[in-house]
Amino acid sequence: MRAGRIFGGANGLRLYAVLYVAFLYLPVLLLPLFSFNDSAIPNFPLTGFTWKWYASMAETPALLDAAWNSAMVGTAASVMATLLGICAARAMTRYRFRGQKAMSGLIMAPLVLPEIIIAVALLVVLLRLGLDLSLLSVVFGHVLICVPYSVTVLIAGFEGFDRSLEEASTDLGETAFGTFRRVTLPMVAPAIVSSLLVSFTISLDEFILAFFLTGTDSTLPVYIWGQLRFAARLPTVLALGTVMLVASFILLTIAEIFRRRNARRTQVEGGLFG
């Protein structure tokens, strides 16, 4: 009877949530723990605290080049995905047209398609077109997978927007583009910033598309994959992974803050975490 009270109802749900979070995040938390360990072997017991693995990151030119490449790819992919997401989200929330649901499903399809299939398909197309693999091809691949996330975030921003403001601007003589620039964009600005940050984070962490589509210039996830062959470099890889983990957490937290600000303004919940 007592066991039934513990594992039933709200208590059972709390226990399930705690176990789920622990199973999900405990392996990830070992990453920063071993990155501060003085030993080059990630194992217990820990031998001492050190910053040397983080210091060695600044002395590795290949790592810095990969970080710069990831920053450029992430910035370009997030801007392009957000611009495409603005167009798609506005069309899906403002207009009704034949085939709208099918079109929405196709835009969201990369969320459920196997990423390796998308990567192989893009690789075949690029090679058939005679294009060289480079960071530009990686950007195109990242835009493809970032657009559905961008649309999801931006739809919440456009759905809560009061259309009477646009109508008032038009009645006062403003053009359609002027109304969009002066009225619509400022109102959905928090959702746009959230979309940029979410897309940048997804691009920063993405590996499979970058692995297939990159040329001689690698991104950070591809660089990490290449370093795993050398046991002596594993501690530096753990330190780099910790930095990427913290950066992703900060970016997604800021994105969620902007999403909640937009939700309070429009009284519409939605987005990736809503």
Image (cartoon, rainbow, N blue to C red):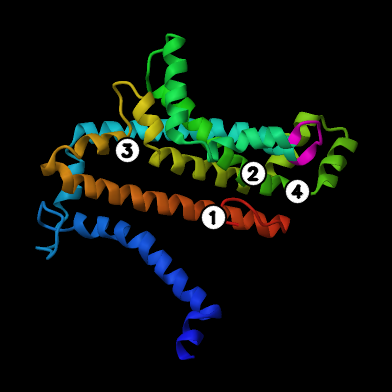
Magenta segment: 93-100
State how far apart marks 2 and 1 are (Cα): 13 Å
State how far apart marks 4 and 3 are (Cα): 38 Å
Task: Classify residue 142 as left or right of residue 109.
Answer: left
- Dot 4 falls on a residue whose secondary structure is loop
Residue highlighted by disc 1: 256
Q: Is residue 102 above or below residue 273?
A: above
- Of tags 3 and 2, the one toward the viewer is 3
- Residue ID at (26%, 55%): 31
State how far apart marks 4 and 2 are (Cα): 11 Å
| Mark seen at residue 154 | 2
Pointer 3: residues within 10 angstroms few (<14), some, or many (20+)? Answer: many
- Dot 1 falls on a residue whose secondary structure is helix
Residue highlighted by disc 3: 221
Q: Residue 196 or 148: which is nearer the viewer?
A: 148
The amino acid beneath tag 1 is: Glu
Q: Dominant secondary structure of the magenta stretch?
A: loop
| Mark seen at residue 161 | 4
The amino acid beneath tag 4 is: Phe
